[in-house]
Amino acid sequence: MVDLPVIIENPAGLKTLYRPDINETYHSQHGAIQESMHVFIEAGMRFWIKTKQQKKLSILEIGFGTGLNAILSLIEAEAHDIHVHYTGLETLALPYSLVSKLGYQAHWDQEHETKYAAMHEGEWESNLTIDTNFELQKRLIGIENFETNEQFDLVYFDAFAPDKQSELWDLAIFQKIFQLLAIGGILVTYSAKGDVRRNLLAAGFEVEKLEGPPHKRHMLRAVKMKTQ
Ligand SMILES: C[S@@+](CC[C@H](N)C(=O)[O-])C[C@H]1O[C@@H](n2cnc3c(N)ncnc32)[C@H](O)[C@@H]1O
């Protein structure tokens, strides 16, 4: 059994979660919200909305964790009036009593904090209607064992870093995700490591290196242009 992560704080007072057993944080220590907005919302969700102009979007997240990407996606779905079906995969469920201490609520209002709490307190393995724009399914299962008939439009690949969890960044996992995506589907991730890029290319994706969030040079966006 893995212990729950602990909260650490940077000199500017920004908090994140830390797993001592693997010496790894959940987010950049330069700011979780800024990083999530840049990598997943801006390069992923907003790019998808701009290029596809569709009203329904299905998102798969590898590493639901604090649910930060989920609540930011909900806020974005409301702003663009689109409907999101969000599936979050996770192997270590975090309680709201822990994530609510990270100070994220300073970035949204009480109504959204209530929705954020509902995301955490809702049952795993069931469909949760968080609001009219947003349905959530949390699955307590690793990507390597996940099976579904669903096809996704957008994948947020937010596993721990490749040097901590190399098995999640290998070709077999990216081949699996390629199969889970619809044609035109997109994967975004914060890592721009050479091996990650090569594995994505070998899985069949077209891969773009984009500017990374502050304090990080690059990130990757991979698109499934055709069936392999
Ligand atoms: C870098 S953290 C990011 C978490 C989350 N996206 C967030 O914003 O808080 C990586 C997450 O991946 C989860 N994880 C670890 N192994 C996994 C696996 N095999 N499949 C899916 N998620 C996994 C971890 O427990 C952790 O919550």
Image (tube, helix red, strand yellow):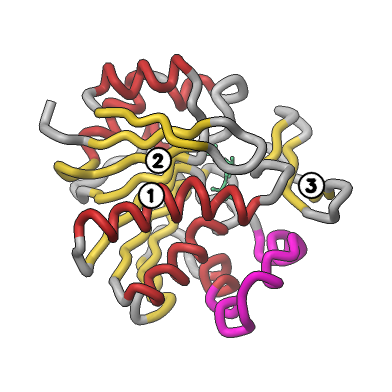
Upstream in sequence: badge 3 or badge 1: 3
* Residue at mark 1: 44
> Residue 188: which disc?
2
* Residue at mark 3: 6
**Residue 165 part of the magenta segment:** no
Magenta part of the chain: 95-115
Q: Amino acid at mark 1?
A: Gly
Q: Is residue 106 above or below residue 184?
A: below
Q: Quadrant of ligand 1?
A: top right
The residue under the point 51% across, 30% down is 191
Q: Please name whichever residue, 25 or 44, is drawn nearer the observer in this view of the structure.
A: 44
Dot 3 beta carbon under 8 Å from ligand 1: no
Q: CA distance from mark 3 to mark 2?
A: 27 Å
Q: Is residue 224 above or below residue 119?
A: above
Foreground mark, 3 or 2, reads 2
Q: CA distance from mark 2 to mark 1?
A: 6 Å
Upstream in sequence: badge 2 or badge 1: 1
The residue under the point 61% across, 53% down is 34
Q: CA distance from mark 3 to mark 1?
A: 29 Å
**Residue 101 part of the magenta segment:** yes
**Which quadrant holds residue 21?**
top right
Q: Amino acid at mark 3?
A: Val
